[in-house]
Image (cartoon, grey):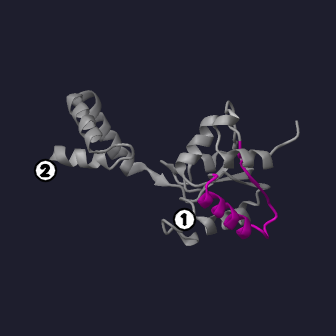
Amino acid sequence: MNDNPLDQLIRHLAGLPGLGPRSARRVALHLINRKDDILIPLARTLEATAQTIKICSACGNIDHADPCRICTDRARDQRQICVVASVADLWAIERTGGYRGLYHILGGVLSALDGVRPEDLRLQQLVTRVGDLQPQEVILALSATVDGQATAHVIMDLLREAPVKISRLAHGVPVGGELDYLDDGTIMTAMRSRAAV
């Protein structure tokens, strides 16, 4: 391939999650065929986003302001901090509308295979934040994977001396899930986490 703008576009699109070279070519063709109503506005939006987006120095969220809108929203419950691995996890929780506290984004989870160490995550910032804000509860909303659980244990150790309640998201049978279709680990976790009715 020559290094012309179309080839560069296809190469950049192919680097996005869920897009391979063939899908990237189809998207590029669609964008070019809809140049005036999709491609040019998209290019302007990407440029504006690149120039204005910031990482919140308090929680790690992405926003147009630092600190972000969530951290500066006085209507949020300052007594709770929900710890998540990524901005995508924050968005997923916010989408539910059921949580009104603050967040802390770690920037990933510990992973020996991927070489992610404690110093690669925003763990010390969390400890400092808990010390400064003195929340009543830290909610560990990390994945139920080995890496997510290892990260949760490290956080519990780091906050061991802090006068704060540490809770985790419930794990187990999803709403609408049928036992016959669930894996053994999910069923066992649900059995251990059962609650009185």
Residue 164 rendering spot, x and y as whole percentages: 80, 60
Residue 69 visible somewhere in the drawing:
no
Residue 99 falls in image quadrant: top right
Which corner quadrant holds the C terminus? top right
Q: Is 61 left or right of 14, judged from the image as shown?
A: right
Residue 112 in percent (x, y) is at 53, 68
Q: What is the quadrant of residue 155 in the picture?
A: bottom right
Q: Residues within 10 Å of mark 2 (few under 14, many from 20)?
A: few
Q: Give the camera-side residue of 100 and 138.
A: 138
Q: Nearer the viewer, residue 110 or 55?
A: 110
Residue in view at x 70 percent, y 39 percent: 173
User: For numbered disc 1, what is the local secondary structure?
Assistant: loop
Residue position marked by numbered label 1 in the rendering: 111
Which residues are drawn in magenta?
144-172
- For residue 40, which quarter of the picture? top left
Q: Amino acid at mark 2?
A: Met
40 left or right, relative to 179: left
Q: Earlier in the sequence, mark 2 or mark 1?
A: 2
Compared with residue 97, is residue 55 higher up or lower down, i.e. above or below?
A: below
The circle on residue 122 is none
> For the point 44% across and 50% down, which residue is it?
53
**Alpha-carbon distance for marks 2 and 1?**
37 Å
Query: What residue is shown with label 2?
Result: 1
- Magenta span contains residue 9: no
| Vertical placement of residue 7 versus 152, above or below | above
Residue kind at label 1, given as amino acid type: Ser
Label 2 element class: loop
